[in-house]
Image: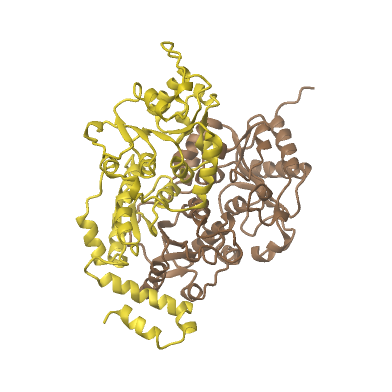
Amino acid sequence: MLEKLASLFDHGRPRTAADKPLFVAFLDYAYMPYALGDAVTWLENAQVHARDAGAAAIDVVLLASPERPAPVWQPHVTAYNFVASLHGILPVFFSSPMVRNVHVLEQRQTFYDMVTDLHEQGAASWPGIGALVEERLNFISHLSIVEQFRRCGSIPLLNAPRGYEKQASTFIDTYCPDHFRIVINVRQSHLTAAGTNLERDSRFEPWAKFISRTANEYPDAIFIVVGQYSDVDRAFFRLPAVVAPRSRGFGLGAELALLQGADLFMGTSSGFAQAAFFGHPSYIVTHIEPRAAIHCGVEVGVRHHPFGRIDQVVTWKPETAEDLAEEFDTVLARKAERGDRVPVRRRRVV
Amino acid sequence: MTRGEILNAIAGLIPDRVFNRPAVQVLRARLAAADQRERTVVGPDLPILGEIAIDGVADWRTQFTAALWSLAHAAADSPSRAIWMLCVAASPEAPDELYSLMAQANSPTQLHMIANEHEAVVFRERYVPLASLREAAARTLPSVVEVLMRIDPERSVFTRATAVRAAAHVFAKRIGGEGALIAIHGAQAVAAANAYLNRADAAVPLRILAFGDPQEVPEGLRADCRLTIARRAGFSLLDELALVRFCDGYVGPADHYAIVAADGGVPCLLSSEVGTKYTPARWSRVRVVSDFATPLGPWLERLITRPMAVRVRAGTGS
């Protein structure tokens, strides 16, 4: 298990500036929302474009400037609070094994200077110079990713974010050594002050019922509930076999590391689900919006992303406890077929 | 005539709607940056460069904060200058914490997390103005004790107004109430606070906020309702740094929390093996000791708003 965890942190270092060609991923938060899922998709797109360019490493340049702190559709993010918004998702940018240097800028002049300098060097970038100048960025599309998968048969995967290894191992050693780790994220944006797209939220009750039933049936399973401190319903803490990293002093970086090293991820379509899509764990992601299908390059109702394995399942409707149990059993069967670890079911006394 | 002066001359010749187009803005930025890079004398608009090596450095948070404090003072004297911090680390531990520290400075800041020294050389050559490089080479970054000796709350530099700070203010008022809210950090401070809480009457108007790794707080103390473990309450380092400025006192090592607290004028009781080298300024509210055991009680009791309420069960030790 420790070897598996360690492999997630293998970033192939050391690398030097001699890595050619140079690839730089630019992100300007003046027109990109502060959202975990969008940041994950942006990073995966950067990996895909870097791979196409034959680059071995990516330099990330982020601009969050007080004069234009957020896009027009995030009016609640202002010069007064953008620091907290960026801080809340920063660990994501260390999730790519290809990422080398990360620059967090507050001055547009330096950002544009780097854009033009790298253009002069002939460096490839995501997005391209034209899109950067015109401030065009499709940050939700999976189409380039799907296209690369169809062409190459694989996509570059995200890892546990660099710098959070120690925290993730401490968490596992303390709370769930030798357990079958199921990372859970139930979207409950209605619990936050700036709740958005509430129709994408999931109800607590079906998940609570599923967790209680599964914890009873599989004594070695543990549910690690991830999400912003305000997102996670406090009632989760009263369920059996549940531990929430944020309430134990851990942050997003440790949560993403736990997700990538988990035996299974289950959750509503959200930022953590995106990290699972482009990462390592088996997953069951529920309640995907039909309108997302066009961006994902799939038909509404498909069971797997084009780049998904048989133990990586998506569903398109709000979940019930019965649906969750059925999907759980299906994925466990698939995992067993693959020779992966599955939890041990409690023996029934006749 | 510099490129900047040429640009300003052009500005008068072409309409604003053209001059403000993104493509022209990109060009303007490029020329202005090129102009700055060629300058040989330190002056307005030039970045103030600071560098920190992080790999293998246990107290990088403290070193980073001390360096940032020093650079923020330089920036306060020249408001058009931004602070650029170069952090060289192949695998920085908790990069979000670096950003949390960086976001304390009131000046515009840029954080460059560079994977290795070779990359740092490339970055300096390509983007850092010559004058800034020379200025950085001539500057010696102060140690934490030197910073603590120089801190003057009247010239506070970690003053960025953020929503995090506003939320921290509300929390500190709610949890602290009318009593004293004391932040603690580190095993030594936790042990001393534990001993004090065991002796002090429950009626003492005192609330303790433990920062950092929750594992440092022993089981027995976790059950004490006068103590809140900040990280377990969902606070990150960014929140803690905001909270410490609204506490009535800080007890812990001479670290990043201490610098932020002292900068905000919060009384600090700090432990440091170099305590003998520490000479407080006349206005200083920072006291450095080698051990908390004896001085903590009297120090706390001076901060508690109703000191007469303190009834210590003398001699019991528990």
Report the residue that reaches farthest toward the left.
B138
Report the residue that reaches farthest toward the bottom.
B13
In the rendered view, would you say B42 is above or below B303? below
- What color is chain B drawn in? yellow
Report the residue that reaches farthest toward the top.
B315
Q: Is residue A157 left or right of residue B269?
A: right
Q: Nearer the viewer, residue A176 or A233?
A: A233
The image quadrant of residue A141 is bottom right
Position in image of residue A177 (x %, y %)? 54, 31
Residue A10 visible in this rendered orientation of the protein: no
The image quadrant of residue B256 is top left
Chain shown brown: that is A
Position in image of residue A242 (x %, y %)? 63, 34
Q: Is residue B304 left or right of residue B36?
A: right
Q: Nearer the viewer, residue B96 or A304?
A: B96
Residue B26 visible in this rendered orientation of the protein: yes
Position in image of residue B272 (x %, y %)? 29, 32
User: Residue at (54%, 46%) from the top-left corner?
Assistant: B167
Question: How many numbered discs sit on the rendered protein?
Answer: 0
